[in-house]
Image (cartoon, rainbow, N blue to C red):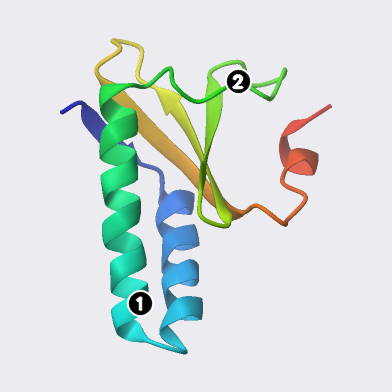
Amino acid sequence: MGRILRRPQFLEDLRMVWDFIARDSEDRADAFVFELERRYRMLSDNPLVGPQRFPRYPDMRMFPFRHYIILYAALADGNGIELIRLLNAARDYHRYFDD
């Protein structure tokens, strides 16, 4: 398995998503995180699988997960990923990264 680095903003996004889901069920929130971790372990082994969508940030890639978008970058040595953000797919996330 490749290395997985998590930016502070990604961890904050994850905490907010967990809190939102946990309002209904902490078990569902925990299951969401468990499934998300499986997804980004897969990404760490295949860091180039997600498309590049942001011209100003050519190293940043995105990958869908349920109703969310995982924003990440492949590590320079090709042995893992850095998780950047976890954003709701319904949100206009492009405005943060496009020109």
Which image quarter is the N terminus in? Answer: top left
Query: Which residue is under mark 2?
Result: 52
Q: Residue furthest top?
A: 77
**Image coordinates for residue 12, horizontal then vertical, percent:** 45, 61
- Furthest toward the left, the residue is 1
**Residue drawn at 40 percent across, 56 percent down:** 11
Give x and y (percent) for residue 35: 31, 56
User: Which of 94/7 is in front?
Assistant: 94
Question: Residue 25: which quarter of the image?
Answer: bottom left
State how many labels appear: 2
Q: Is residue 97 left or right of residue 15?
A: right
Which quadrant of the structure image shows residue 30? Answer: bottom left
Q: Amino acid at mark 2?
A: Gln
Instruction: Tell me if residue 31 comes above or below residue 90 in the rendering.
Output: below
**Quick one: SS at disc 1?**
helix
Residue 44 % position (x, y): 29, 29
Q: Which residue is mark 1?
A: 28
Q: Who's the residue at 42% across and 72% down the image?
A: 18
